[in-house]
Image (spheres, helix red, strand yellow):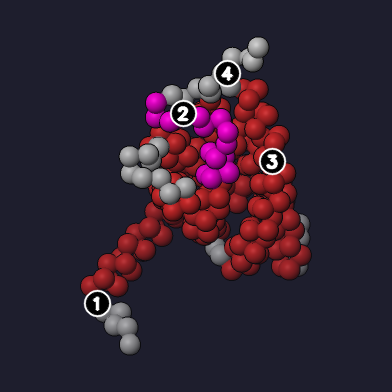
């Protein structure tokens, strides 16, 4: 039997209540910090577990880039969508099952399409400083990422919209998003353009044309 009066459980409960209070009183900064930290965890897992990189080969630049985009762009986008845009769109729907289904569809079409296009573009542009190359990367990866996004996020969105209070929606999305961000980190970064270490050079290598 678990003893919930143990110090570790009391500490966990205290931290949870403090975090919950921050979500209610300072929602956007809290969500931004959470997204950034989770992105650091996800990219680290991707490099260590999926890509089998050693500590010496770990790209801190890449991890910070992923975290920056999640913190400064992904979290505010999710906050705006779940807190303001989506409630307005589904407000006329008074029958809850219809409202939930509509919310899931909008999440996995409108929000996913926009966030994938803009997110991939930002990550590629920050990495290579190449507008056209970033646009081409979005075009080449969008369909695959959107398809996998729908497979992964439909169930998450259904649970989120049915049971989760609005101020927890981004948190739940972030927790589930650890796995999604591992996939995104691998998909975006495992490209032929990674010829040199990112920490050594952040621009694409241009090969001379063959004679």
Q: Which mark is residue 100?
A: none
| Residue 199 falls inside the magenta stretch | yes
Q: Which residue is mark 2?
A: 196
Range of residues picked out in magenta:
185-200
In the rendered view, would you say 112 is above or below 211?
below
Q: Which mark is residue 6?
A: 1
> Quarter-wise, where is residue 207 in the image?
top right
Q: Residue furthest left?
A: 7
The mark lying in front, picked from 4 and 3, is: 4
Prevalent SS, magenta region: loop
Q: Is residue 35 shown to the viewer in this render?
A: no
* Residue 94 left/right relative to 188: right
N-term-proximal mark, 4 vs 2 = 2
In the rendered view, would you say 4 is above or below 18?
below
Q: Which residue is mark 4?
A: 207
The span from disc 2 to disc 3 (Cα, nearest Å) is: 25 Å
Q: Are marks 4 and 3 in contact (CB under 8 Å)?
A: no
The mark lying in front, picked from 3 and 1, is: 3
Q: Which residue is mark 3?
A: 142
* Residue 117 left/right relative to 60: right
Give the x, y percent position of residue 192: 58, 33
The mark lying in front, picked from 1 and 2, is: 2
Residue under the point 52% across and 49% down:
181
């Amino acid at each position: 039997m678990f003893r919930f009066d143990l110090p570790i459980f009391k500490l966990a409960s205290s931290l949870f209540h403090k975090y919950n209070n921050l979500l209610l009183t300072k929602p956007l900064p809290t969500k931004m910090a959470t997204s950034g930290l989770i992105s650091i965890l996800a990219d680290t897992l991707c490099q260590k577990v999926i890509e089998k990189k050693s500590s010496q080969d770990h790209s801190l630049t890449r991890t910070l880039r992923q975290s920056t985009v999640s913190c400064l762009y992904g979290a505010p986008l999710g906050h705006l969508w779940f807190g303001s845009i989506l409630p307005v769109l589904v407000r006329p729907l008074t029958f809850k099952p219809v409202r939930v289904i509509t919310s899931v569809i909008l999440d996995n079409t409108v929000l996913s399409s926009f966030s994938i296009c803009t997110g991939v573009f930002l990550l590629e542009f920050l990495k290579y400083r190449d507008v056209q190359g970033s646009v081409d990367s979005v075009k080449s990866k969008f369909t695959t990422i959107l398809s996998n996004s729908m497979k992964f996020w439909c169930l998450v969105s259904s649970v989120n919209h049915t049971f989760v209070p609005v101020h927890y929606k981004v948190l739940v999305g972030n927790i589930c998003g650890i796995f999604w961000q591992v996939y995104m980190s691998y998909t975006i970064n495992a490209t032929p353009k990674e010829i040199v270490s990112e920490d050594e050079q952040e621009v694409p290598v241009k090969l001379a044309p063959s004679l």
